Amino acid sequence: MNAQSTGKVNNKIGAGESAQDAGSTNTAESKQATSRQLIAIIFILAIATKMFLLPIFLIRTTGRDAYIAMAIGGGIDLVALGVMIAAMYLSREVDFFTLLSSTIGKVGAKIAVALIGLFLFFKLNTAVAEILAFYGNNVLNGFNVSLMTIVLLVFFAAVGVHTLRALCRLNELLVPLIVACLTVLAVIVILTGFDLANIFPSLQNPESFTDGLMRHAAWIGDFTPLVLFMGRTKLKKSTGAFAAGAGAIGTAVAVFFTMIMSAAFGNVPMLADSTTNLSNILQFSIGNVYGRIDMFSSILWSISVFIEAALFFYATCRCVAFVIGKNAHFWISLAVTVLVYIAQVFALADRTLFSLAVTSLPTSAVIFAFTIAVPTLAVTCALVQRNKRNRAERDS
């Protein structure tokens, strides 16, 4: 056996021991996601929570410049995505939890994962609050938040006890429907036309724009759950390029539709200030020429945000499993669903309170920090471990 082979074998053995000792879920979930599934999930993450409340909030604070703020936020996410993809390639065989344990020790890894889990839990509640707001304002009359929350959490609990591969397969089946809805909506919007002159001149009020931009960082960090794909994805040479492309296309879609709504801002300022009803704003944005065209956006947004929220739930549960050192997925999923229910029904039931919570400067600062820190931590640990392997191979 040559030195290189010996190094790889020792690395795998060490990774396995570290996973067991640190309570990693990787030993219980050996199945891997495919490159196509990774690309599909990245596309969903790029558009899901950026196509409903965020454009409306941005229009309220930055007016016609909302699409610029959306582009900046999307750009930050794309940088984080690029770093995350690099980390995946550097750590093809070792999962994120094992990587952390090997680099910063068991205790340090548990502390780091606990903090990441809290971040993911916050993002999960943001997505769930959007789902409830959407169905309360757009779909159901006499909407019962408690009942809808229970139905939603039953779905999440079912996701939590399955493998990452199962969630990826579900996403892979739904992506074609989302793409079809996006295509139809985009074609109709283009044929209808919209007045781009309404978005000029740009940045007339820089102070208001800066404040609005800084207060809406709660909607970045959507690619953070991709740490679960480290060491569990069958990567090909072209996977990184296609994955980055999927993120860029999804971000462009979100910016495009925000631009449409920004262009209509001059005609609907009172509507934007008084409602979170996506259907009404989109109807005004395209002149209501084609009737209930908002249904296309409703379908694609509903499917996308359900998948994203499910992934955040899954990632939160796996972080808890690592911290407590047990793969009790059923009980962990049940506990997280109870916490989400309490947060939604008691803490965030008042949508005004929710808006204040997610648009505060302290919240935005924390979310921005985690958006940058998590992929940076992943790629740093991957580089450290690669250097250790290289030194071990040279010494042997």
Image (tube, rainbow, N blue to C red):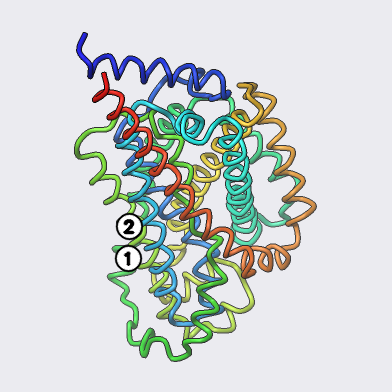
Q: Looking at this rendering, what residue extends furthest in the right direction?
A: 346
Image coordinates for residue 179, horizontal then vertical, percent: 33, 49
Q: Which residue is mark 1?
A: 188
Apparent side of residue 7 relative to residue 178 in the rendered image (left or right): left
Image coordinates for residue 355, horizontal then vertical, percent: 66, 66
**Above or below — where is 198 with respect to 127?**
below
Is residue 69 in view?
Answer: yes
**Above or below — where is 265 with respect to 370?**
below
From the image, which quarter does the N terminus lie in? top left
Image coordinates for residue 212, horizontal then vertical, percent: 54, 76
Q: Kindly indicate the quadrant of the structure image that contains residue 170.
A: top left
Q: Which residue is mark 2?
A: 184
Is residue 260 in view?
Answer: no
From the image, which quarter does the C terminus lie in? top left
Q: Amino acid at mark 2?
A: Val
Apparent side of residue 356 relative to residue 106 in the rendered image (left or right): right
State if disc 2 and disc 1 touch (CB < 8 Å).
yes
Q: Kindly indicate the quadrant of the structure image that contains residue 202.
A: bottom left
